Amino acid sequence: MLGFSKPKPAVTGDVKSSHSPNRYRVSLRNSLSYHQTRNAVLVAFLIGIVLSSVQIYLDYFSQKNELDELVGDVLVTANNAAFHAAYNLDDRGAEQITQGLISNLPIVSATIHDDSGAVLGAATKDIEIPQTQFKRLLFGDQSLIDKTLFDPDIHDKPVGKLIVLVDPSLTADNFIQRSFVVFGSGIVRNFFLAICLIALFYYTTTRPILKASQPIQEGNTDQSIPLPENHKNDEIGVFINAFNDHLATIKEQHQQILEVNENLENTVESRTTELRREREKALRNSQEKSEFLAMMSHEIRTPMNGILGMSEVLQKSTLPPQQREYLDAIHESSKSLMSLMNSALDYSKYEQGAHEFERKPFDLHGLIHSIVFSTGSSAESRGLTLTEQIDPKVPKYVVGDPDRLRQVFINLINNAVKFTDKGSISVFAKTGTMKSGQKNVSSTDILFSVVDTGVGIAEEARDKIFRPYNQANQSISQRFGGTGLGLTICKEIVEQQGGTIGFTSAVDHGSNFWFRIRFGIAESTDVEERVEHSEEKTSELAVPELNILVVDDIKINRKLMSAQLGAQANSILTATDGKAALELLRENSIDLVFMDVHMPVLDGIETTQIIRADEKIASVKIVGVTANINTETREQCQRCGMDLVLSKPVNQSGLKSAIHFLFDGTKVNSDAGALPSQQSAEILLDMNILQEHQTMLGDERTATLYQEADLSARELLKKLHETPLSSADLLEQYSHSLAGLCSNFGFVQTGILAQNVETIAINNPDAITSESLDAVRRSCEKTLSLVATRL
């Protein structure tokens, strides 16, 4: 039975398919004719060989049997005649008998002896063709037959002997000739038989199949084969029906595959979109977590500084022993809490990649000396020895970030002191590879190590030692405390500078924490010039009187910042939005602008871009102020051209630090200007902000400001409730203004609720409900009532 594979569809257009119908038909017919003939001839040849071989084989054994019978019969007949010739001593008769024996083909010679051994008659055949080894192999070697002539009926004693030499190979020639005839005739006979069978199969099988497969030959591979009328009930009909059924199954499966592929593509696309959303959500959550951690850590630092400062003041006073013991406990606990908050804040910054590393020349040897000296007292208090060893090859002056290097060393040394009960702690520094070149591009790898004889680290805890919030085990955390952020911060600092960090440790035998950082190589003159320049700058802390423009869409926010800046005797102008700010900038000589980032009409970003594009006012210093400061907002403010960004609420020292940074280069942390804020939805009023305002402005002026804040907040609440829920833009504007006001004056809960409304208005306007606006109103009324009792 022949099978046909489904040909590929022809390519449309100008390119001709290699499976054209005519070519396919000719190829199919030629292929059938050639293969059928070749196979038939081959089969006929093989069958002929097999059958002829069997016939020759049978003929061979038949001839051998006939030969044996012939020799036996001849000897039986000749034995009687030879007996009488020997008995009568008939020489002539004996001669005739031997001649008669050699006339038989296989007998070579014959001899008759009398009873005395005398030869009565002998005859030998002349053999013209020598017998080959092959003939001997077929029929065997010559054999000598010795027959005693004895007939008891005639004479009681033998009368002589008949000796015959038989050579069976003499009959091989006849056998070989006959075998060639049989072999050749068998092949020819079978060949003609094969030809007849080919013709029979062609007309009964092949031709109907070719005719039925006409649609396939013409390229119509998706159509069923028509069933010939005269082949409905035979094998061809079964074959065609099976083919058509198989073709229908293929079509059905192909359709199913197309549907499955389409569903799979849709599923993959849907799943990919879902995974992308989940990833973006996870990234947002991680960023929000980091921002929240940074905010909370920062906000707690200010009240903790107050606690530490006041406890230090009390420690200098005269107190009873028990009260002094309580005070010392408060002071130590406050220092521990401050350390934890600083670690959390540092980790959050490094995790977000928000920290920028300095590249300045400094005295590396001196830095290590000062670190060991400053931490030596804590080591000595535990009975430990703290030493340093600096390889002479380590350059004294290098270019890098000394503050971050100091932070890594202090974390590692403090860890070593914490986890070492007895023994020593050693700080090592040695140089690695060095690349020579020009002065400003020469660099060297320096390997630092902090080795202790402490408790060591168990094998199972080593994989997580650099993970955030992880310590070696629970008992370590309970015994020594800490957040588990110290080593994580070290890892971030080192790796963000392109370095590597690691450790080796053995339980109860101590640990070796090492890190490698590449530093530029500096000269002593570079460090000296920098120190002199720094001294000159610090001597110029006084800032000339400035013309400052405060831009904020909330009136009370403008008044508050004006009051804060007015304490520094600066000339203050205010503007309600970016458009008004541009007019004032073009009409007045302004040195510094405090720009609210989010405002109606023209926001801070757009206003800054316009300012920077205007040559007449482009040089003005601009400080962005926003309640929602994050990495994205900060980058956006920097891209548009702002010189600095501060987060609300801003205290007076923060404003002063910003001014010094912009006009005399004194370093400022943009987050340092923010007042401590207790960002919990449970808190109505942040007393830290209220107290800071009272300290700075006085009780009477503060009361006036907060009364105006009360009026502004109620006005914004009224606008929120009068705005239809469908007006998302207005709701966003009013809720943002209310959130900014609350941030400046410490209305914590109301600010959080207003900010939530703003977020919903931006991301999902349809989700705004009257209940959320009512929650803002109720919180604001409670807060304003509380403020009235505190003023």
Image: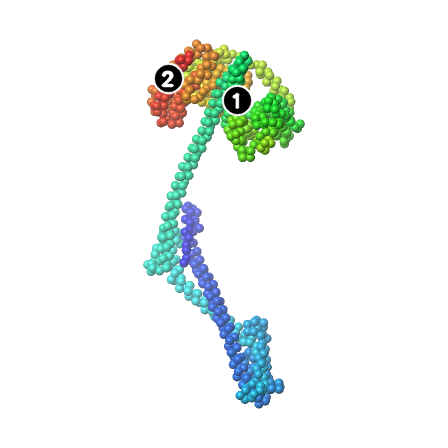
Q: Answer whether residue 496 is visible to the viewer in this image.
A: no
Counting from the top left corner in percent of width and height, residue 450 is at 60, 28
Give left or right: position of 475 versus 522: left
* Coloring applied to the structure: rainbow
The amino acid beneath tag 1 is Ser
Question: Quadrant of residue 101 in the image?
Answer: bottom right
Disc 2 designates what residue? 781
Q: Residue at coordinates 52% horizontally, 31% vertically from top-left?
A: 473
Q: Quadrant of residue 104?
A: bottom right
- Crowding at label 2, few (<14), some or many (≥20) Cα neighbours within 10 Å? some
Residue 264: x and y in percent read: 40, 41
Nearest the eye: 357 or 182: 357
Report x, y in % for residue 780. 38, 18
For the point 61% across and 20% down, the residue is 530
Instruction: Return the x and y of residue 95 as percentages of the image width and height.
Output: 58, 86
149 shown above or below 311 = below
Give the residue type at disc 2: Glu
Q: How many labels does the image show?
A: 2
Q: Nearer the viewer, mark 2 or mark 1?
A: 1
Q: Is residue 158 visible?
A: yes
From what the image shows, is residue 686 above or below residue 122? Answer: above
